[in-house]
Image (cartoon, grey):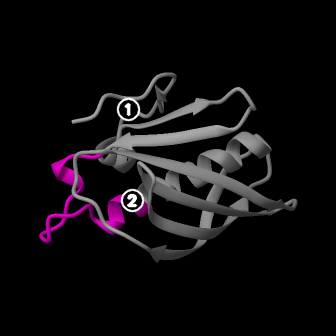
Amino acid sequence: MTDVPEGFQPFEIGSGFIHHNGPYFWRKDAAGQYDFGFQSDVRHGNPNGVLHGGAVLAFLDTVLGFAVVIATQRKCATVSLDTRFISTVPPGGWIDGRVIIKKLTRSLAFVDAEAFAGDKLLVTTGSVFRIFEA
């Protein structure tokens, strides 16, 4: 089990799937960029003894949407996730997530994300989110 890295605070979600799969954490660095993470455990494993891709993808989907909401101050929903599973690790370590907003329009957000275990790239995804009117 890894301790939550310094400066991270939990998402304020008390129920539902995100609560069950997390808790997820976030922090804002000195440059104003957001970092995300979660502590993986046996719940996030698959029968092959590695982190289940769906657990990592659910995390990335959540932090992608969080980044869109922060940038737009509006609710959003996932339209598509184009995902590549690059590598595996056993459950039990801290998983980092990084998000890059590529383009925002009035109704759509184009956003990329990556998940890492230490320096090891696990998953990349390009996404499109629908941005709702205020």
Q: Residue at position x 43%, y 63% from top? A: 57
Q: How many marks?
A: 2
- The crowding category of the residue bearing disc 1, from other C-alpha atoms within 10 Å (few below 14, some 14 to 19, many at least 20), is few
Which mark, by number, is residue 14?
1
| Residue lying furthest front | 119
Seen at 75% across and 32% down, the residue is 31
Viewer-side residue, 33 vs 70: 33
Q: Pick out the residue farthest to the right.
A: 106
Highlighted magenta segment, given as a residue range:
40-57
Magenta-drawn stretch contains 56:
yes
Label 2, label 1: how far apart the Cα atoms are: 20 Å
**Which label sits in the foreground, 2 or 1?**
2
Give the SS element for disc 2: helix
- The circle on residue 46 is none
Residue 99 screen position, x and y as percent = 63, 52
Q: Which residue is mark 2?
A: 56
**Residue 6 rendering spot, x and y as whole percentages:** 46, 22
Q: Position of residue 69 (x, y in %)?
A: 69, 45
